[in-house]
Image (tube, helix red, strand yellow):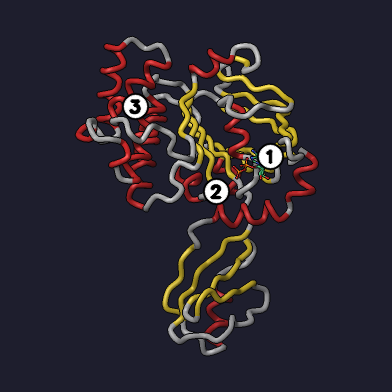
């Protein structure tokens, strides 16, 4: 049984925007799944439908076998959701927010208290349990959102842009926590347009653009589809423009740095020979880290034709 099954899902908003044009997705239990796409692609709409905040126009959605049309409460009880916006009552304490949330799911008071302690501790918020939520830092509020989503111990955790706007340290701590949560058996789906996040965390990825799924595969397979690699080269003397290197696409990102696309069939020696011939001294070279970002740009630029075949 799939953790999440989406078939031919469509959504047309009242203003006529077709946010989803018939998407199919399956997420297996235990998966760590990324729904990737640029702004306006349809990620939040998809999550909104799965979590019953948005009404679908057509198609079917089920969560651990529970169809949201016929077994909505059962489907909802399987899901913990961390929306983009902070939406708890800012005048309540962290402890109350969690205990009340457990109450919404019919969890007895005593168990709710135990769970509150467990999850506030896991998210390093226990010493803030009596603090009014409004007084917490941005990073703490994010963690409180996650603790709240977990307090009824859902089998599927859905996070919409979990690390948007948080600094790198908080982001890494959150990644670590999400990884551990997944290792404990919780299926995780996250939406992101932050591509390194998907690459770092997720085994499976679906890429959505303009309401259509344009790629859906193992992350490792998706990365392999990348034919060319981009190298970043630093040069000793500043350059006014990118050097012309026959056979290579070369861009200047700043006067000391250029990016060169190298297809699989070409070696690197040629690059250095040609640069040296132009009197350009290289200082260092590295692989451009975010290969997924490149892939994404390529897929999106071809999406109308590919999307239509899906
Ligand atoms: P993403 O989360 O990938 O940024 P969304 O699902 O928020 O994308 O949006 C998909 C499309 O639907 C966009 O064109 C957006 O403008 C439109 N949209 C989203 N919410 C609404 C709404 N409540 N009413 C009308 N159009 C909307």
Instruction: Nearest to the eye among marks 2 and 3: give it.
Output: 3
Foreground of the two, 7 or 286: 7
| Quadrant placement of the N terminus | top right
- Image location (x, y in percent) of residue 91: 33, 34
**As drawn, is 193 to the left or to the right of 41?**
left
Decide: few, some or many residues near mark 3? Use Cα within 10 Å; few <14, some 14-19, many ≥20.
many
Q: Where, by quadrant of the figure, is residue 14 drawn?
A: top right
Image point 34% across, 34% down: which residue? 144
Q: Where, by quadrant of the figure, is residue 4 drawn?
A: top right
| Secondary-structure class at tag 3 | helix
Q: Residue furthest bottom?
A: 279
- The label on residue 97 is 3
Separation of residues labelled 3 and 1 (CA atoms): 36 Å
| Secondary-structure class at tag 2 | loop
Quickly name the residue at label 2: 193
- Image location (x, y in percent) of residue 51: 56, 26
Image point 50% across, 62% down: which residue? 288
Instruction: Nearest to the eye among marks 3 and 1: give it.
Output: 3
Quickly name the residue at label 1: 213
- Indicate whether 294 appears above or below 273: above
Foreground of the two, 41 or 84: 84
**As drawn, is 117 to the left or to the right of 157?**
left
Does the closest atom of ligand 1 sit within 8 Å of the Cβ of label 2?
A: yes
Sequence-earlier tag: 2 or 1: 2
């Amino acid at each position: 049984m799939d953790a999440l099954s989406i078939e031919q899902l469509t959504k047309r908003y009242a203003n006529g925007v077709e946010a989803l044009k018939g998407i199919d997705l399956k997420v297996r239990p235990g998966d760590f799944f990324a729904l990737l796409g640029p702004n306006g692609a349809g990620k939040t709409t998809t999550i909104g439908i799965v979590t019953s905040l948005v009404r679908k126009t057509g198609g079917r959605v089920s969560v651990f076998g529970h169809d949201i049309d016929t077994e909505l409460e059962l489907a909802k009880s399987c899901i913990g959701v961390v929306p983009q916006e902070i939406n708890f009552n800012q005048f309540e304490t962290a402890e109350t927010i969690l205990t009340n949330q457990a109450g919404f799911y019919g969890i007895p008071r005593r168990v709710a208290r135990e769970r509150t302690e467990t999850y506030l501790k896991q998210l390093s918020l226990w010493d803030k349990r009596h603090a009014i939520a409004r007084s917490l830092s941005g990073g703490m509020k994010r963690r409180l959102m996650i603790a709240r989503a977990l307090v009824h111990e859902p089998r599927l955790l859905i996070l919409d842009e979990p690390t948007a706007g948080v600094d790198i340290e908080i982001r890494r701590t959150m990644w670590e926590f999400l990884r551990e949560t997944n290792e404990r058996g919780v299926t995780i789906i996250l939406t992101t347009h932050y591509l390194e996040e998907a690459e770092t965390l997720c085994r499976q990825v679906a890429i959505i653009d303009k309401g259509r799924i344009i790629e859906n595969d193992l992350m490792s397979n998706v990365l392999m589809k990348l034919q060319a690699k981009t190298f970043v080269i630093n040069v000793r003397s500043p350059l006014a423009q990118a050097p012309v290197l026959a056979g290579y696409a070369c861009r200047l990102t700043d006067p000391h740095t250029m990016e060169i696309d190298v297809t699989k069939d070409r070696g690197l020696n040629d690059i250095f020979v040609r640069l040296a011939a132009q009197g350009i001294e290289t200082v260092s070279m590295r692989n451009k880290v975010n290969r997924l970002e490149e892939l994404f740009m390529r897929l999106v630029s071809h999406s109308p034709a590919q999307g239509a075949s899906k």
